[in-house]
Image (cartoon, grey):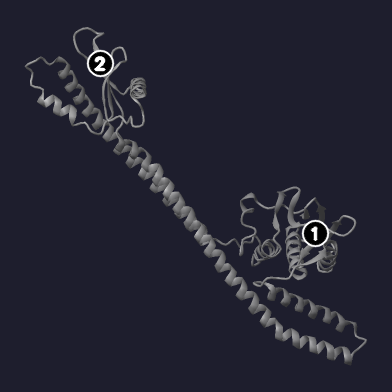
């Protein structure tokens, strides 16, 4: 059964909310910028008319209203140029830090740029087509800020969503850690009493029936239960890592699994010659390998080939566990290591998540799906740091 995680739905809601906010902000800002641009263009037409009247005015013309219109423009950058490109006057252009010559060249270049982009109103002074001036204008500071504002808001919303998702994942992981720790400690505690009792009974049986081989087999199973209890007790605490020969461990795991799987399952070992030294915790690492092997047995449905290969690189040791099953669906690749996820009709979906936890958190290694194909099967890869002699 596949479990649906509420955190995934929460992430989707947060992302969709961010998109809605961003779209709404961009649309509203664009509408506002458009309205202000139209309004400023109308103001510049009035300002250009005032400039035309100023150029036509005679000695006895009352220019009080014209000058009032011209002087009231304190926000829109404007440059007045003649037909030859010479600057006659300008307003609201920042020329701070420039000398007179540089300022003139800067204003002239700015005016030419505005003419090229069409932000110009041509005023004809007389009837001659060549007698005109260009009123060049730019967007005000307010419009420029409004154009940038949605991008800033989008960035803030994105940061908020990223922080919220990170906090959600951190809380989820911490909650899982508490559940794992509590479950593991309680399991080890509950197993301790009956195991102790069974161990005592096996000793009594061995003394009473010293030649009964079944008692020694039962003793092996009790020791196995003790090993399982020890494994659970180590979860949540910092395990002790020791330098160990990886090949010996893998041989032991293969021998154990071979006795507990169908004869139709063929396990092939491809190990290098000599020792391969890694720093691991014996109980937890064997548990992780067993979980991956059990997953491989389930994948081939009790009939097929499982290959265990060890590759020694310069600084890394790779353990590849491949099977001849039908592979993993592409949509499930990101979920197979999540607690509770399983594609089987029965199962808790804890095996691979436990393996990932033991390999990555306790051994500082990596475990991932190297490849998966419906025809060739699946290859799980475990990466460990190599210990040099």
Give the number of the disc on residue 261: none
In this rendering, position of residue 259 left or right of residue 79: right
- Tell me the CA gap for discs 2 and 1: 82 Å
**First reached walking from the N terminus: tag 2 or tag 1:** 2
Q: Position of residue 343 (x, y in %)?
A: 64, 59
As rendered, which of 226 and 53 lies closer to the eye?
53
Residue 87 vertical position relative to residue 351 in the rendered view, above or below:
above
Count neighbours of disc 2 (C-alpha within 10 A) and say few if under 14, some if 14 to 19, many if 20 or more.
many
Question: How many numbered circles are shown?
Answer: 2
The quarter holding residue 57 reads top left
Q: Are marks 2 and 1 in contact (CB under 8 Å)?
A: no
Q: Nearer the viewer, residue 34 or 211?
A: 34
Q: Quick one: SS at disc 1?
A: loop
Marker disc for residue 133: 2
* Residue 150 position in % (x across, y down): 38, 42
Q: Residue furthest right?
A: 211
In terms of depth relative to the viewer, which is nearer, 192 or 329? 192
Element assignment for label 2: strand
Residue 170's image quarter?
A: bottom right
Tell which residue pokes out farthest to the front in this image.
Answer: 99
Residue 128 in picture, x, y percent from top left: 22, 7
Residue at 90% across, 56% down: 273
Identify the residue shown where x is 81% and y is 69%. Answer: 260
Q: Is residue 166 left or right of residue 317?
A: left
Q: What residue does disc 1 label?
A: 387
On the picture, is 263 further left or further right than 47?
right
Determine the residue positioned at 33% across, 29% down: 95
- Vertical comparison of 29 with 228: above or below: above
């Amino acid at each position: 059964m596949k479990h649906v995680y509420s955190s995934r739905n929460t992430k989707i809601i947060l992302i969709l909310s961010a998109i809605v906010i961003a779209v709404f902000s961009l649309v509203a800002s664009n509408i506002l910028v458009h309205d202000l641009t139209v309004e400023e263009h109308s103001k510049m037409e009035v300002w250009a008319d005032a400039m035309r009247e100023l150029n036509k005015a005679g000695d006895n013309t009352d220019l009080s209203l014209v000058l009032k219109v011209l002087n009231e423009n304190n926000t829109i950058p404007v440059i007045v140029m003649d037909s030859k490109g010479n600057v006659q006057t300008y307003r609201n252009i920042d020329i701070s830090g420039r000398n007179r010559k540089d300022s003139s060249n800067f204003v002239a270049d700015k005016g030419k740029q505005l003419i090229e982009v069409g932000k110009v109103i041509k005023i004809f002074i007389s009837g001659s087509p060549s007698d005109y001036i260009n009123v060049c204008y730019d967007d005000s500071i307010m419009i420029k800020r409004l154009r940038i504002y949605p991008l800033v808001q989008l960035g803030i919303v994105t940061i908020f969503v990223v922080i919220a998702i990170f906090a959600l994942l951190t809380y989820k992981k911490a909650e899982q850690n508490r559940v794992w720790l509590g479950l593991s400690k309680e399991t080890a505690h509950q197993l301790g009493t009956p195991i102790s009792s069974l161990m005592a009974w096996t000793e009594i049986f061995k003394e009473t029936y010293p030649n009964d081989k079944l008692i020694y087999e039962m003793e092996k199973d009790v020791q196995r239960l003790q090993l399982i209890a020890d494994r659970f007790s180590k979860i949540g605490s910092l395990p002790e890592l020791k330098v160990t020969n990886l090949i010996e461990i893998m041989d032991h795991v293969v021998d154990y699994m071979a006795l507990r799987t169908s004869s139709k399952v063929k396990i092939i070992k491809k190990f290098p010659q000599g020792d391969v030294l890694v720093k691991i915790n014996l109980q937890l690492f064997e548990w992780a390998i067993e979980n991956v092997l059990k997953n491989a047995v389930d994948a081939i449905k009790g009939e097929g080939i499982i290959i265990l290969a060890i590759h020694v690189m310069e600084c890394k040791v790779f353990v590849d566990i491949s099977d001849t099953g039908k592979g993993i669906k592409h949509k499930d690749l990101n979920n197979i290591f999540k607690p509770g996820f399983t594609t089987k009709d029965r199962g808790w979906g804890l095996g691979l998540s436990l393996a990932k936890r033991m390999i990555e958190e306790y051994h500082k290694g990596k475990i991932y799906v190297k490849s998966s194909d419906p025809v060739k099967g699946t290859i799980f890869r475990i990466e460990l740091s190599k210990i040099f002699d």
